[in-house]
Image (cartoon, rainbow, N blue to C red):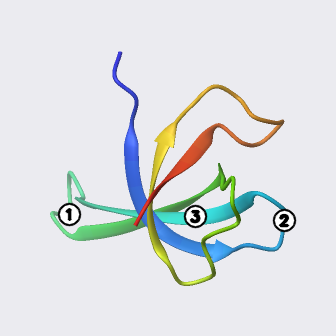
């Protein structure tokens, strides 16, 4: 099964080698036919602490790095 790649914005870089990425998805509501925005935060591994708050990044699934980290930062 291929690894998922998501795009989002860094919302926190307070922890060492970790960034929090907000990923937003848009879809049409099945009954109301209105566009709905849903967002979710992922904790991703950032080896070199290269990314700061506000950066647009892509993340990819990986083996668990810690209790909460299952993603790695690919880059901008």
Residue 45 shown left or right of residue 33 in the figure: right
Q: Secondary structure at mark 2?
A: loop
Position of residue 57 relative to residue 14, above or below, is above
Label 3 to label 2, Cα distance in Å?
A: 13 Å
Label 1 to label 3, Cα distance in Å?
A: 29 Å
Which one is closest to the eye, mark 1 or mark 2? 2
Label disc, if present, on residue 32 of the rendered structure: 1
Label disc, if present, on residue 57 of the rendered structure: none
Residue 46 shown left or right of residue 16 in the figure: left
**Which residue is painted at 38% across and 44% down in the image?**
5
Label 1 to label 2, Cα distance in Å?
A: 41 Å
Q: Secondary structure at mark 3?
A: strand
Residue 36 shown left or right of residue 55 in the figure: left
Residue identifier under label 2? 15
Residue identifier under label 3? 21
Figure quadrant of residue 1: top left
Is the residue marked by circle 2 packed among few (<14), some (14-19), or many (20+) residues within 10 Å? Answer: few
* Closer to us: 69 or 38: 69
Q: Secondary structure at mark 1?
A: loop
**Which residue is painted at 47% across and 42% down in the image?**
60
Residue 22 rendering spot, x and y as whole percentages: 54, 67
Residue 65 rendering spot, x and y as whole percentages: 75, 34
Mark 3–mark 2 CB contact (< 8 Å): no
Which one is closest to the eye, mark 3 or mark 2? 2
Residue 71 rendering spot, x and y as whole percentages: 59, 42
**Which residue is painted at 60% across and 72% down in the image?**
51
Residue 48 rendering spot, x and y as whole percentages: 69, 60
Mark before the other along the chain sequence, 3 or 2? 2
Mark 1–mark 2 CB contact (< 8 Å): no
Mark before the other along the chain sequence, 1 or 2? 2
**Which residue is painted at 66% across and 56% down in the image?**
46
Mark before the other along the chain sequence, 1 or 3? 3
């Amino acid at each position: 099964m291929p690894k998922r790649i998501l795009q989002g914005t860094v919302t926190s870089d307070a922890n060492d080698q970790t960034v929090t990425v907000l990923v937003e998805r848009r879809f049409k509501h099945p009954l109301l036919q209105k566009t709905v925005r849903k967002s979710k935060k992922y904790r991703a591994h950032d080896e070199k602490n290269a990314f700061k708050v506000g950066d647009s990044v892509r993340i990819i699934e990986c083996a668990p790095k810690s209790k909460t980290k299952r993603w790695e930062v690919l880059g901008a």
